[in-house]
Amino acid sequence: MLKSSVAVALVLSLGTEALVPRAESCCFHLTASGGESGEVGQLFDGQNRIHGNYPEGEYCIDAEGAITDGEGRGCILTPPTTQFQCDTGATPTPGFSVNQEGNLVYSDTTEMWACATGDQGSYNIYTEPVDEEACVEITLAADECKGEGAPEGEGEGEGAGPTEGGEGEGAGEGPTTTEHCPAELSGPFEFPHLIVPVSSMHPDQIYGNTFSPKISDEFSTLFNFDIPPSDEGKTCTLVFLFPEETQLETSSFTFSGSGAIDVKELSGNALDTTTFDNMPEVETDFGVTTVAPGNEYPIHSFDCPAGERITFELSTVGDTELDFFQDSNPEPIGLYITKC
């Protein structure tokens, strides 16, 4: 339970104050102002967002500057994009503090960034901008817990490492849940039945069904999955498998950039005639998953929608460019749904 609540206002101040550590955590709520303003809410999976009519987030900070949310999830800065989110099983990123003006501080600055998600006009929160055009500078402040958190000068470290269910550098970027099905094709799984690239630079161009997804500043790719009626009552996990190129037998890929990919569920299904202009709207944005070769990424677990078709979009964040041949032969590569 929260011991106190904090409304956070964003102030364009970069100064920090000396802090007085305390043994117990101090709890608060967040409100943003600056380039974007409003209460900081949370998705069900722990992503922190401005706007979007999400339930107000609740947070507690301890003497090491580690923050947990009201569900007990560790709040982290996901590497390398530094998105501020709270994940089940994650060790909180230390080094946060609240200065005497009530501003949230990390790495000796109150400067934060709000970056558009494309979902209900909402913004994710970062300590570094991931896209100069989609991000605006903000500051976070508190009317409680002033002087709490890590001593001045701490908090220079990198973001948190893998969270529960992830493997390798950068795992855990996307939202996590309490239970995931295996992030491998060792049991029942679904291969996408339609894969359609769409181009923001050629919004009316039809590219049709393909086994070669494209993710870049021009292209995003839509994936349809058909869930059989027999999967009623099962758990489904959306996974991205990204082996080393030397592990591939019948596939290949080209990859550059940070590896940050935004994963979204769409409100409707793709067709082989779908284009950028007529693609379905975003229903749920699962946030950024940062991928690197040699890893398996469980992105989101949910009750299998038996007898239904569902569609997901993979798009770039920043400088990521990835082309690959979707293939379930050893080693599997691409987007799948595993079931358990």
Image (tube, grey):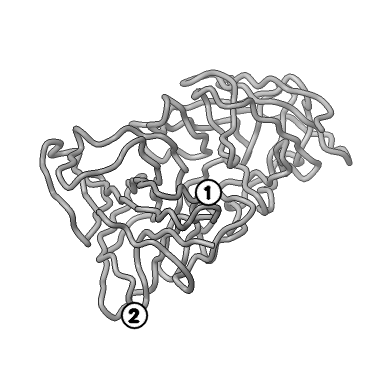
Q: Mark 1 points at which residue?
A: 302
Q: Nearer the viewer, residue 214 or 206?
A: 206
- Whole-percent x, y for residue 20 in the image: 84, 34
- Disc 1/disc 2 C-alpha distance (Å): 32 Å
Q: What element carries label 2?
A: helix
Residue 154 in the image: above or below residue 114: below
The residue at the point 44 percent across, 37 percent down is 284
Pick the front one: 124 or 210: 210
Front of the two marks 1 and 2: 1
Residue shown at 62% from the left, 47% from the top = 87
- The residue carrying pointer 1 sits among few (fewer than 14), some (14 to 19) or many (20 or more) residues within 10 Å by Cα, namely some
Task: Check the image and name the residue furthest to the right.
Answer: 23
Q: Residue furthest front?
A: 230
* Residue 262 x %, y %: 39, 45
Which mark is drawn over residue 246?
2
Q: At 46% from the left edge and 21% from the top edge, which residue is drawn?
A: 35
Q: Do the residues labelled 1 and 2 touch (CB within 8 Å)?
A: no
Q: Say left or right for 66 vs 175.
A: right
Estimate how packed mark 2 is, as few (under 14), some (14 to 19) or many (20 or more) residues with alpha carbons within 10 Å: few
Badge number at residue 206: none
Q: What element carries label 1?
A: strand
Residue 37 x/y as whole percent: 52, 18
Which residue is more in the foreground, 17 or 227?
Answer: 227
Q: How many marks?
A: 2
Q: What residue type is labelled 1?
A: Phe
